Image (cartoon, rainbow, N blue to C red):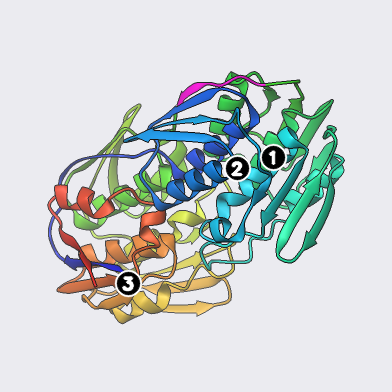
């Protein structure tokens, strides 16, 4: 198992290029199951979750080849409708093959998913939607079993705007008979990216990026050549790091429009940010100001940036209130930040953060993907040495983050133990 060791206090500067978005790549790779022929995907990040999806696609009968950040997936030989526990347990996003398998093969048997311990994240909304589209759904022995001679369109209302639920329904609906309308749909950029790919494949979709998505089913789709959008959470993480360290940091190959809520909050906290079409620069010219925050579905402040922002508030001037409304267990990182000297109190879904003069390096343990990133940021700004253990979580969502920080001047390295 690897760990990351950081000597804090180094000023960072320079340019960092953002990798492709994991949360866009995973559903887009799954969409290859919907068509015969070879799909080509560029700017795919090098992550454990991507490798897990690759192995799952191969298990299902697709041919997968990759060279650096380019993947080619040919699902012409799709011949297996089962996603087994040993593959699915490694990555919650494996549930994204459910919709495409039922749409393409008329049957799917998918293990109930695993993933980070940040909340329940039930898949009942996925299953209820497929049921409204005519699928027979059964759960037995830890597996979801779904079957339908052919799915039919319908009116679907989501109790909450679930991202993977919206994506699963979209992929199921593009090959269904008739029209499907998804109300209270998720609006994230990754939803729009998936819709763009599906439309290039020949799907008929309107309304992506709004709360109502309409899909008219087609008889078949064709393969595509597409590039994965930049990862807005990685960009936000480096943007926050640039503010913490105080020197100029340039974030390139990004889409600032996907980060409006994050940029606004950082500016409220005193950051000076210049925004261009595909890059941003950030520096701190004054003491960090305490700023309250509430996570919300897009276009609100993303829950995936809450832990990183909490590090910022832990050395801010004054007290800030951070409310987490998306996942119920997303304050697990607080105990580790307190080991580094942060003054944080938790009450339900609210954290009261009193800024301290500095954080102190300490051995800490990562509990989930974004908590891992927050501990890296804390280590970069802390006095002394920080050792972040269990960084396999980090490798699920950040492409060589320690190498990128090292190239900016950080004293950081990975060690096998």
> Residue at horizontal 46%, vertical 37%?
258
In this rendering, position of residue 389 left or right of residue 219: left
In this rendering, position of residue 409 left or right of residue 60: left
Mark 1 crowd level (few <14, some 14–19, many ≥20, 10 Å Cα): many
**Of the image marks 2 and 3, the number of the one nearer the N terminus:** 2
> Residue at horizontal 69%, vertical 24%?
206
Q: Nearer the viewer, mark 2 or mark 1?
A: 2
Q: Which residue is mark 1?
A: 101
Question: Percent x, y for residue 156?
Answer: 81, 41
Question: Percent x, y for residue 18?
Answer: 32, 39
Cα distance in 3D space between marks 1 and 3: 50 Å
In this rendering, position of residue 166 left or right of residue 342: right
**Of the image marks 1 and 3, the number of the one nearer the N terminus:** 1
**Of the image marks 2 and 1, the number of the one nearer the N terminus:** 2
Could you say which is closer to the camera, residue 6 or residue 2? 2
Q: Is residue 358 visible?
A: no
Range shown magenta = 221-226
Q: Nearer the viewer, mark 1 or mark 3?
A: 1
Mark 3 crowd level (few <14, some 14–19, many ≥20, 10 Å Cα): many
> Residue at horizontal 64%, vertical 40%?
167
Q: Main secondary structure of the magenta part?
A: loop
Question: Percent x, y for residue 90?
Answer: 51, 59
Q: Which residue is mark 3?
A: 355
Q: Which residue is mark 2?
A: 60
Does residue 358 sit above or below 327 in this rendering? below
Tell me whether circle 2 and circle 1 mark residues in contact (CB < 8 Å): yes
Could you say which is closer to the camera, residue 382 or residue 345? 382
Does residue 140 sit above or below 263 in this rendering? below
Q: Secondary structure at mark 1?
A: helix
Q: Secondary structure at mark 3?
A: loop
Could you say which is closer to the camera, residue 48 or residue 149? 149
Tell me whether circle 1 and circle 3 mark residues in contact (CB < 8 Å): no
């Amino acid at each position: 198992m690897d760990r990351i060791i950081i000597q804090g206090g180094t000023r960072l500067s320079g340019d960092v290029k953002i990798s492709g978005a994991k949360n866009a790549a995973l559903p887009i790779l799954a969409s290859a199951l919907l068509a015969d022929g070879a799909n080509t995907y560029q700017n795919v990040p090098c992550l454990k979750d991507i490798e897990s999806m690759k192995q799952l696609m191969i298990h299902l009968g697709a041919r997968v080849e990759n060279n650096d950040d380019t993947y080619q997936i040919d699902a012409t030989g799709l011949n297996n409708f089962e996603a087994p526990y040993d593959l699915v347990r490694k990555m919650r996003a494996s549930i994204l093959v459910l919709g495409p398998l039922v749409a393409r093969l008329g049957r799917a048997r998918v293990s109930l998913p695993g993933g980070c311990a940040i909340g329940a994240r039930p898949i009942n909304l996925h299953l209820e939607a497929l049921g409204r589209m005519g699928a027979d759904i059964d759960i037995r022995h830890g597996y979801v079993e779904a079957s339908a001679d052919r799915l039919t369109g319908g009116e679907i209302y989501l109790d909450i705007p679930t991202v993977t639920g919206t994506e699963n329904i979209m992929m199921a609906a593009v090959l269904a008979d008739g029209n499907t309308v998804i109300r209270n749909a998720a609006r994230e950029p990754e939803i729009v990216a998936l819709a763009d790919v599906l439309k290039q494949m020949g799907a008929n979709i309107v309304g992506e990026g709004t709360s109502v998505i309409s899909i008219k089913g087609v008889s078949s789709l064709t393969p595509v050549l597409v590039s994965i959008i930049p990862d807005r959470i990685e960009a936000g993480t480096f943007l926050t790091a640039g503010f913490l360290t105080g020197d100029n940091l340039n974030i390139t190959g990004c889409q600032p429009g996907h980060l409006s809520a994050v940029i606004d909050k950082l500016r409220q906290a005193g950051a000076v940010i210049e925004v261009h079409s595909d890059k941003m620069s950030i520096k701190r010219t004054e003491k960090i100001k305490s700023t309250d925050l509430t996570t919300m579905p897009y276009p609100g402040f993303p829950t995936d940036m809450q832990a990183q922002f909490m590090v910022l508030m832990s050395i801010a001037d004054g007290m800030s209130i951070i409310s987490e409304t998306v996942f119920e267990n997303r304050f697990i990182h607080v105990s580790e930040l307190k080991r580094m000297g942060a003054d944080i109190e938790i009450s339900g879904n609210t954290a009261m953060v009193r800024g301290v003069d500095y954080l102190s390096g300490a051995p800490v343990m990562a509990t989930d993907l974004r908590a891992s990133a927050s501990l890296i940021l804390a280590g970069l700004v802390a006095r002394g040495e920080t050792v972040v253990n269990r960084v396999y979580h980090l490798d699920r969502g950040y492409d060589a983050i320690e190498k990128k920080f090292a190239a900016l001047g950080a004293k950081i390295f990975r060690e096998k133990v």
